[in-house]
Image (cartoon, grey):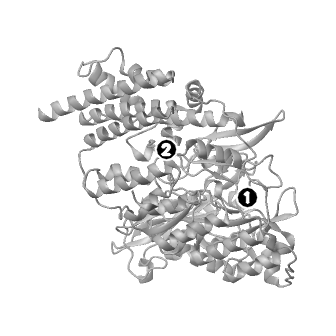
Amino acid sequence: MQSFRTEIEHPLVQKDLIELERKIHEFHGGKIDEERFRTLRLARGIYGQRQFGVQMIRIKIPYGKLSGEQLIRIAKVSDEYSRGRLHITTRQDVQIHHVSLDRTPELWAELERDDITIREACGNTVRNITASEFAGIDPNELFDVRPYADALFQYFLRNPIGQELGRKLKFSFSSGDDDTALSYMHDLGFIPRVQDGAKGFKILVGGGLGSQSRQADVLYEFALVDQIIGITEALIRVFEKHGERTRRMKARLKFLIKEVGIEMFKNWINEELENVPNPIVKIEEDIFPEVRFATSLKNISWGQDDSDAYRDWLESNTFPQKGSSLYAVGIKVHLGDFYTNQARALAKLVIGHTGNELTFTLGQNIIIRHVKASTLPFIYRELEKIGLADPGFNSIADVTACPGTDTCNLGISSSTGLAVVVEDLLKAEYSELVKNEALNIKISGCMNACGQHMIAQIGFQGMSMNGPDKRVLPAIQVLLGGGTLGNGRGRFADKVIKIPSKRALDALRLILNDYALSEKSFLDYYDEKGERYFYDLLKPLSGTENLLETDYLDWGHTRQYEKAVGVGECAGVVIDLVSTLLVESEDKISEAKGAAAKEQFSDAIYYTYQSIVNTAKALLIAEGKKTNSHHLIINDFDEHFIKTNRIKIKGEFSDFALKHKQNVTSESVKSSIIDAVWFYSQAKQLREQEVVA
C-alpha cells in the first residue's frame, strides 16, 4: 500500500482512495466502460476538461467556510498537481485544472490531511451545500444557519442514498428573507423562521436554472430544525423512485415536480417520511470554536490611512458583524481566479491578524471574518500588496462568470474573455456605477447557467450564429430583468436578443446610457420600458450583413472561432452496458455486506435495494425496455420477467424489491443480502443463457 494512503487515518477516506486508484487501473485496462468510470470519477470531484488528457478537480467547501491552514493546503496541492491557479465557483467550491487522472488519488489524500474533500463535488450526487456569505455574522439574521448546513453535509456525505442519483441535487441555506443563498433556484432551499420561540425553516423545492428555469415551490412554510434531515432524506428517496433516469435533459427534480405537481410531490414526501430511519435528528448548534486572535495582535501600532483609495475600499468592502465590534472584509476576486502566491499571503494574514476564518462566496469572492476595527488600515495595505484590495465588492463592476470555453466541455463561447472587457469598460466609462450593489452583470458560456446569467439584471449567455458566408461566429444572448426578490421568490431574466459577441460592449453601452436617464431601480426601469423596448434598442446590433473579420474571433482569442461542445473527456474501451450494470450490482452486494458487518443496517438495506434495482435494469436494457425511473423499472420488470415466469419469485416484484426497506433490523438485513445474492445469480444465469442462445 502506497504511503500517501497509509498516512490517512480515516478508514472511509482510505477506502475511497484505494477504490479510486483501483478503478483508474481497471479503466485503463478496459475492464470498466467509459460511461461507468465517468460516473464514478465525477462523484469524486474529477471532471474531464475541454483539453484532452487532463482533469478539473472540484474541491468541496461546505457553505464556503475554511481556515487559513486549509487555504494553504489547497495552494500546496495546486502547485504540486496543477498550475498554481485557483478558481472560486458560484457554489462556494474551488477548482483546479490540468490535473493528471493518475495523480488524483494522491491529490485527494493531500487535501484530506486538512479535512478537505472532493467527494461528491461533481456527478449525480448531493452537491456542495451552500449558504449566505454573511451567515453567522449577519446583523439581521434570526439565527446562524451554518450548523444546519453542516449537519446536512455531514449526514449525506458518502451516504448511499445520495450516490448515483438520476441527476444532481443542490441545496442552499439563506440567512434571512433577503434570500442571498438563492433558495428559489435550488432543488431544496431553506430560509430561517422562528415560530412560537422554536427555530425552523421555510423549505422550498424544485427550483433550477438552465434553458427551462423554474421557480421553486414551497414544500413547507415551517418545519422544525430537527426535521430537516428526515425531510431531505425523504426527498432524495422520492427523487430516486420517481425521477427520470434515461432522458438526462429531463432528469432534474424540477421536471418531476412540474409533471406531478407540488401537492402530489408533498404527499410522496409525507409518505416516505414514515420509512426514513431518522425522521427526527437533533442538530448541534454549538459546533464552531470561540474566535481567538493571534498573540501577535498585541502591542502593535497599525497606523492610519487617509487616502481616497482606502476610503473607497472601506466604504464598499467592509461590513460590521452582528453583536460585536468586529468587521468582515470583502475581497473582490476578479472572475473568481487567484493564484497560490496570493492564497498563501492571504492565509498568513488571516492566521496572524484576524480570527482565522474565510468564506468563499456565491459571487466568486472571499470574505475575511472577525477583523478588529483598529487593524483595517493594515489589512488593506497587506491586501493591496497581493492585488486583492480592489473596491466594488458585490457591485456591478464585480462581474460573475463561469470558465466557459477556457476549460469546460460544454462551453460555447468565452465567458471569461467577455467578462474582462466588460469590467474594463465599466471602470473606464461608468466609474459612477462601480459602487452600485443593486445592479449586477452575470455571464455564462452556455445555457446551463453556471454563471447564473438567468437571474442577473443584465446577463449574457454564450451562443453561436452563422455569418452570411456560412462561417460560424461567437454570439451572445442578451438577457435582462432577472433578480432576487426575497422570501424565496425571484425573477428570471427575459431572453431579449442574440447578437455577435464582439458587439456585447456596444449593447451594454446602449443599456447603461438609457438607464442613466432613469431614477428608478434597474428592475423597475426594465419593467416600465418592457422587453420589446430593449429588443428594438438592440436590434441594430443583431444583423450579420456588415461583419468584420474580428467578429469571427472570440474574446481573448486570436484564431477563428470554432464551435466545439462536449470534447475533451478521456476515451476508453466501451464494453457491454448490461454486463457493466451486473458488475455494479455485485459491487453493491459487497458494500451491503461491509455495512452489515459494521452494523450500519440502513446503509446495508439501501445497498441491497440498489443491487436489486440495478440487476433488474440490466435485464430490461437487454430487452430494449425503458428504464426511466426506479418506479418504472420495478413495474416493468414485474410485467416482463416475473409474470412470464422467466424469473420466479412469490408475489409481485415490488414487494420483493422493497420489502426490507420498511423494517430495518439485523435479521432483515441478513435476509435482504440473501435475496440480493439470489436475485443477482438468477439474473446472471438468465443473461448467460440468452446470450448463448
Q: Residues within 10 Å of mark 1 (few under 14, many from 20)?
A: few
Q: Quadrant of residue 67?
A: bottom right
Residue farthest to the bottom, as pictured: 307
Left or right of 302 on screen, residue 412: left
Query: Residue at label 2?
Result: 252
Could you tell me the amino acid type at mark 1?
Answer: Asp
- On the question of residue 429 being in view, the answer is yes
Q: Residue at 56% of width from left, 60% of height from top?
A: 113
Q: Residue at 75% of width from left, 62% of height from top?
A: 521
What is the number of the mark on residue 322? none
- Residue 653 percent across, percent down from the top left: 36, 21
- Residue 184 percent across, percent down from the top left: 64, 47
Image: 343 above or below 262? below
Label 2 secondary element: loop
User: From the image, which quarter does the C terminus lie in?
Assistant: top left
Query: Residue at label 1?
Result: 524
Left or right of 347 on screen, residue 159: left
Going from N to C along the chain, the mark reached first, 2 or 1, is: 2
Give the spatial CA distance, label 2 vs label 1.
32 Å
